[in-house]
Image: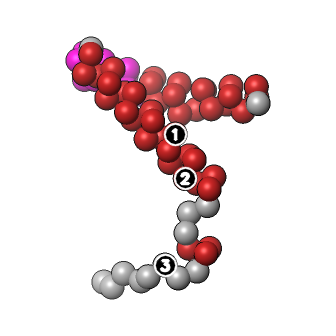
Amino acid sequence: MRLRLLRRWRDFPRRSDLRVFGGYCLCAAVYIAIGVAVTDFLLSFWAGVAYLLIAAWVVPTVVRRLG
């Protein structure tokens, strides 16, 4: 399969897409930092699910409503 070049502006991610991606990267970095400090947190499936729910859904919703 051949990859095609991105030649049009509509093919590139928009600024809002990059902001969402950056938010997920920040959440991942915080999760890894917590996991390094507390290994049990990193290895717990349910703690990971709860963290993702809070960090990627609840916090952005609250920030949007405040701003």
Q: Who's the residue at 63% across and 52% down the image?
A: 16
Which residue is disc 3 drawn over? 6
Which residue is disc 2 drawn over? 18
Q: Could you give the CA–CA distance between mark 3 and mark 1, rounded to whole angstroms?
A: 24 Å
Q: Who's the residue at 68% across and 28% down the image?
A: 63
Q: Residues within 10 Å of mark 2 (few under 14, many from 20)?
A: few
Give the amino acid type for the residue marked by disc 1 in the picture. Answer: Gly
Give the amino acid type for the residue marked by disc 2 in the picture. Answer: Leu
**In the image, 44: left or right of 57?**
left
Mark 1 and mark 2 residues within 8 Å of each other at the beta carbon: no
Which residue is disc 1 drawn over? 23
**Callout 3: helix, strand or loop?**
loop
Q: Image quadrant of residue 60? A: top right
Screen quadrant of the C terminus = top right
Q: Could you give the CA–CA distance between mark 3 and mark 2, rounded to whole angstroms?
A: 16 Å
Q: Earlier in the sequence, mark 1 or mark 2?
A: 2
Above-or-below relation of 52 to 25: above
Q: Could you give the CA–CA distance between mark 1 and mark 2, rounded to whole angstroms?
A: 9 Å
Above-or-below relation of 45 to 12: above
Q: Is residue 48 magenta?
A: yes
Q: Over which residues does the magenta segment extend?
A: 39-49
Q: Which mark is residue 63?
A: none
**Callout 1: helix, strand or loop?**
helix
Q: Position of residue 38 (x, y in %)?
A: 27, 14
Q: Earlier in the sequence, mark 3 or mark 1?
A: 3
